[in-house]
Amino acid sequence: MKKGLLLSVVASGFIFAGGNIAPVQPVAQPQVAPAACDFWGQIGARYEFKKLSDGANKWGKEDNTWKAAVVMGVEKDLGYGFGVGAELAGFSDLGLKKIATNTNNKADLSQLYLTYKNGNTAIKAGRQVLPKSLSPWAWSDDSVGVKDTTFEGVVVVNTDVKDTTLVGAWIAKARPFGGPSVNVNGVNSKGLFMLAAQNKSIANTTLTGTVYYVTEAKITSAWASAETKAGSADLGLQVAYAKASGSDATTGVAAYAGTSFNGIDAKLTLAYLKAGATTLNMGGTSAFWGNSFAGAFGGDILENGSKQTLARLDLGYKIAGYGKVYGGVAYDKVKDSATDKILGGRVGYKFNVGKVAAKVEYRYSKADMTDGSSVKHQRVRVEGIYKF
């Protein structure tokens, strides 16, 4: 089964175009007159260049990537609880591509859906996207605002229980950006089912649980997390499980502790992973906290049969009126694998230029292999995004 497709699948647990599941307020009477349209969008640009340890490329010459993107969406209330939404997205390398893997230009109708709201229940059917808040096994990542994958299915959200959000979803198709739509796991015609619950009845605490089942392929995954805030301290615990019928299961546990004081924030994440045949990273960046190494430093090594101990420290400092500087280091010790260990680091600066959110970041990672060799990666990224 293609993991990039399964990532697409579960992200559909949210009901609104913006990606957040919020309580749906009861409607006393059906709305007869349609409301005005709700528009959203953004314009973004990114330039990055890389360097590999084999010396096959040169900084900013043989391995760079340009990307300019535009995203525009609209959601319209049709009255009587019904609504419709659509999103059009596109990107271009502006004719500046340097490597063959770059795509010149591409556009797609990334979202097209109908909604229905009645009391505390909301239904969304059609092509849609979801972030990872309630769907940590698979979610819709993006690049400069353009969603990598969208999904075609039905999502139901209910908030009748106080401080609790319940989600049920059936996803029939996954749609990589630019299409065409494909079956969830490449061969399965019956889709994927998801059930999720999130409770916030305990002060400053969020409890989340999600289970998945991919029919025919017989893949099961279960996730649970608890996050709380006590004063200036943030604490979290997460467990994750994924298993395909007839293969070894993948299990992971992760925890973090963080704090903020006088503009300084620090966060330490520790994790242990036993990787079976079914990965916790179904494409893009995994929502398993111990796999945050891949998202932050570009070194995903969730290899079948390996056992990994991971540690990551992130630091940041807000400069009043001038943005934020940040950095971090990560370490991954691997057993039963061709990779022995990975060390990574990053440093960056986030700031605003008018209404444009900008970022400059440098990343580095070094993987030591059991045969004594090593592989190094370096990357510089400059990015700016204007939302409207």
Image (tube, rainbow, N blue to C red):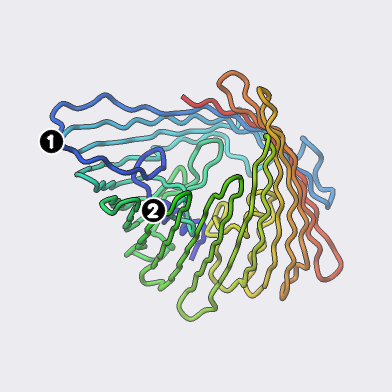
Q: What is the C-alpha distance between the residues marked 1 and 2?
A: 29 Å
Which residue corresponds to the image point at 75% horizontal and 40% vertical from the top-left?
Answer: 347
Q: Residue at x 65, y 27 (%)?
A: 351
Residue 98 shows in this picture: no
- Which of 150/306 is in front? 306
Q: Residue at x 69, y 55 (%)?
A: 299
Residue found at x 47% / y 74%: 244
Image position, residue 219 (x, y; %) = 43, 71
Q: Secondary structure at mark 2?
A: loop
For marks 1 and 2, the one nearer the N-term is 1
Q: Amino acid at mark 1?
A: Gln
Residue 105 disc label: none
Give percent across and percent down for residue 321: 66, 22
**Which disc, if any, is residue 201?**
2
Q: Nearer the viewer, residue 179 or 86?
A: 86
Q: Position of residue 289 (x, y in %)?
A: 59, 57
Evaluate if marks 1 and 2 touch, with contact meaning CB atoms under 8 Å apart.
no
Q: Residues within 10 Å of mark 2 (few under 14, many from 20)?
A: few
Q: Position of residue 173 (x, y in %)?
A: 37, 55
Is residue 322 depicted above or below 110 in this figure?
above
| Closer to the camera in the image, 142 or 178 | 142
Residue 375 visible within the image: yes
Q: Amino acid at mark 2?
A: Ser
Find disc 1 in the rendering and name its residue: 29
Q: Is residue 307 depicted above or below 117 in this figure?
A: below
Quarter where residue 10 is shown: bottom left
Q: Residue furthest bottom?
A: 246
